[in-house]
Image (cartoon, rainbow, N blue to C red):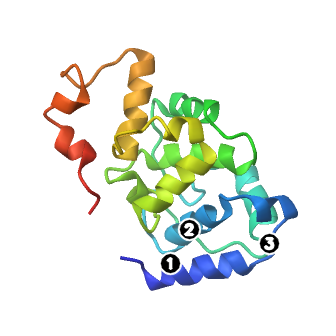
Amino acid sequence: MTHPEHTRIVTELLLRPSSAKARRDPNRPILASLLAGRACGKGVLPTTLGLAAGEMDALWRAYFIGPPLSLPDQPGETLPEGADLIALLLEARAGCFASETWLARIVVAACAGREHLWRDLGLRDRGELSTLLYNAFPDLARQNVGDMKWKKFLYRVYCAREGIYVCPAPSCGVCSDHANCFAPEL
């Protein structure tokens, strides 16, 4: 269910001026939703969304010109595999906008959460996460042909690259966890 305050903040952010390139970026509405989710205290993202101070400043200067939102203080958790996950995403980036680099860092910061990735990101629904991944990392997103949960999918691709096979079955179709990986979002 959509939170009214989240929707209000997204609308306010998208009405702000932005640079010409940021206006053309299909990731701008997703960035607005991430910021709105954080402003509403949703998800596990740190106050900086997982970005360096300079990146956060650049996001505000180009995408949502005006005073930054007041985001509640929240520390983030660092993942030991974080750099590898960021590299995985960056290898698959569309290569059109700076936001793709930011989104790689943001997505990985949210992977530290214990919920579905869209919830850990503070997004409104799984559809927003799918839009983010297909816009920013299309080659990787298209590999999720079975509509596996995104966090599980990212880790599955990461683990396969590293030669770590968590699923004991020879294919997901016969894995005992199949129903959890491919079940509808709640």
Position above or below: 35 against 136: below
What's the residue type where badge 1 is placed? His
Mark 2 Cα-neighbour bin, 10 Å: few <14, some 14–19, many ≥20: many
Residue 138: percent from left, percent from top: 58, 41
Give the secondary structure at mark 2.
helix
Q: Quadrant of residue 43?
A: bottom left
Q: CA distance from mark 3 to mark 1?
A: 19 Å
| Cα–Cα gap, marks 3 and 2 | 16 Å
Figure disc tally: 3
Give the crowd class for mark 3: few <14, some 14-19, many >=20 residues within 10 Å: some
Q: Point out the image quarter for the C terminus.
A: bottom left
x, y percent for residue 36? 55, 72
Please name the residue that numbered disc 1 is placed on. 6
> Which residue is at 63% across, 66% downward?
29
* Residue labelled with disc 2: 33
The residue labelled by disc 3 is 65
CB under 8 Å between callouts 2 and 1? yes
Q: Which mark is residue 175?
A: none
Q: In this view of the protein, can residue 72 be seen by the observer?
A: no
Q: Residue at x 48, y 53 (%)?
A: 130
Judge from the rendering whether residue 95 lies leftward or rightward of residue 74; answer left or right.
right
Tag in front: 3 or 2: 2
| x, y percent for residue 117 | 40, 52
Which residue is at a point 50% across and 43% down the rendered structure image? 108
Disc 2 and disc 1: Cα gap in Å? 7 Å
